[in-house]
């Protein structure tokens, strides 16, 4: 299953809910304002690192850059993706769960 999170974890609990329900082998894509959940040094870093033990977490780099952030500020273990990768992930997974 692919989980997508496009809301800032500082505004909504979408990321926390996603991480609570994601299971081993699932993929999580952070895009739009969801990319804030991929940043080092936030209160979400521990939750994200724990989820990385069983899930693949990706961040959409164009959205990261559009918000003035660089990849070196992303939590280690999160994979950088582009739009083509996003499409591939959607096609490869039988289900897509959008966390709004």
Image (cartoon, rainbow, N blue to C red):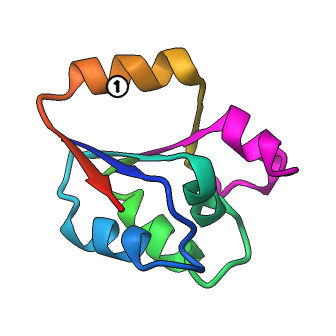
* Residue stretch rendered in magenta on the structure: 57-76
Q: Position of residue 5 (x, y in %)?
A: 43, 55
Q: Residue furthest bottom?
A: 43
Residue that appears at 14% across and 36% down: 95
Q: Where's the N terminus, which quadrant?
A: top left
Q: Position of residue 86 (x, y in %)?
A: 45, 26
Q: Is residue 11 left or right of residue 53?
A: right
Q: Is residue 63 magenta?
A: yes
Secondary structure under the numbered disc 1 in the rendered image: helix
Residue that appears at 32% across and 51% down: 55
The answer to whether one can see residue 54 in this image is no
Q: Is residue 24 above or below residue 48?
A: above
Q: Position of residue 19 (x, y in %)?
A: 32, 68
Q: Where's the C terminus, which quadrant?
A: bottom left
5, 75: nearer the viewer? 5
Q: Please name the residue that numbered disc 1 is placed on.
A: 89
Quarter where residue 25 is shown: top left
């Amino acid at each position: 299953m692919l989980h997508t999170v496009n809301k800032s974890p500082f505004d909504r609990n979408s990321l926390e809910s996603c991480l609570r329900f994601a299971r081993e082998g699932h993929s999580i894509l952070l895009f739009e304002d969801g990319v804030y959940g991929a940043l080092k040094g936030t209160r979400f870093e521990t939750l994200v690192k724990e989820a990385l033990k069983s899930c693949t977490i990706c961040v959409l780099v164009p959205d990261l850059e559009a918000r003035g952030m660089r990849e070196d500020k992303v939590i280690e273990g999160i994979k950088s993706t582009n739009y083509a990768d996003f499409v591939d992930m959607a096609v490869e997974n039988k289900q897509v769960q959008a966390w709004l």
